Amino acid sequence: MQVKFAVFALGLLAACGGVQTAAIPVDPALPSGDPRQERLVFNECAIYFAAVAKLRADGRSPNGDPTRGCPADAVSRAADINPMVSVPSVSPGFPQELYGRMIARGVPTDLANDISRSKAFWDLVAQRDSAVGSF
């Protein structure tokens, strides 16, 4: 009975336009329509899809919908979110902004802490710095 009600409620929300998705914010340092923006969003979304998969594998749920507004094909991009042994601390600027976005999108703090020490996180930071630095 509860499952039927949940399915009905979700269908009703969708029909009424109640399901909203938020886009990943674009980087203001890059021109509008720049293909580097798309790559940054795609790789950030790959991190969110990997985080949701990790939570589910651990029997946990996100605090929201981290993948909202993400392109669906980002799920196919592998993102190594396992913490590395030696990494820099999350510094002000884009690393802190990215960390804050993970928390705001529903990634639990403990997993966001691990992800902030991962190859995927620091590869995205380097990719963003490279894109902005070349502009």
Image (cartoon, grey):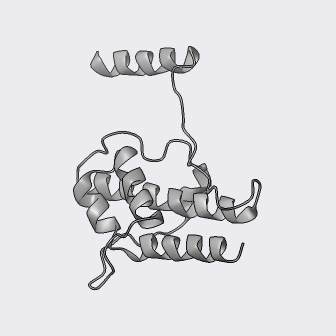
Q: Nearer the viewer, residue 69 or 124?
A: 124
Q: Quadrant of residue 64?
A: top left
Q: Is 86 located above or below residue 120 in the figure?
A: below
Q: Position of residue 54 (x, y in %)?
A: 32, 59
Q: Which is more toward the observer, 33 or 14?
A: 33
> Which residue is at the far bottom?
86
Q: For residue 74, what is the image quadrant?
A: bottom right
Of 47 and 32, nearer the camera is 32
Q: Residue 50: in sight, yes or no? A: no
Q: Position of residue 47 (x, y in %)?
A: 45, 61
Residue occupying the point 55% across, 64% down: 43
Residue 97 picture location, percent across and down: 43, 57
Q: Residue furthest right?
A: 33
Depicted 61 relative to depicted 130: above or below: above
Q: Quadrant of residue 106?
A: top left
Relative to 42, is 106 on the left or the right? left
Residue at left 35%, top 15%?
Answer: 5
Quadrant (top left/top right/bottom left/bottom right) for the N terminus = top left
Horizontally, residue 10 falls left or right of residue 127, namely left
Q: Is residue 23 left or right of residue 98?
A: right
The residue under the point 32% across, 22% down is 3
Quarter of the rendering occupied by the C terminus: bottom right
Disc tally is 0
Q: Observer-nearest residue: 53 or 24?
A: 24
Residue 87 seen in the figure:
yes
> Residue 107, image x and y in percent?
33, 50
Residue at x 50%, y 42% (from the top left corner) = 68
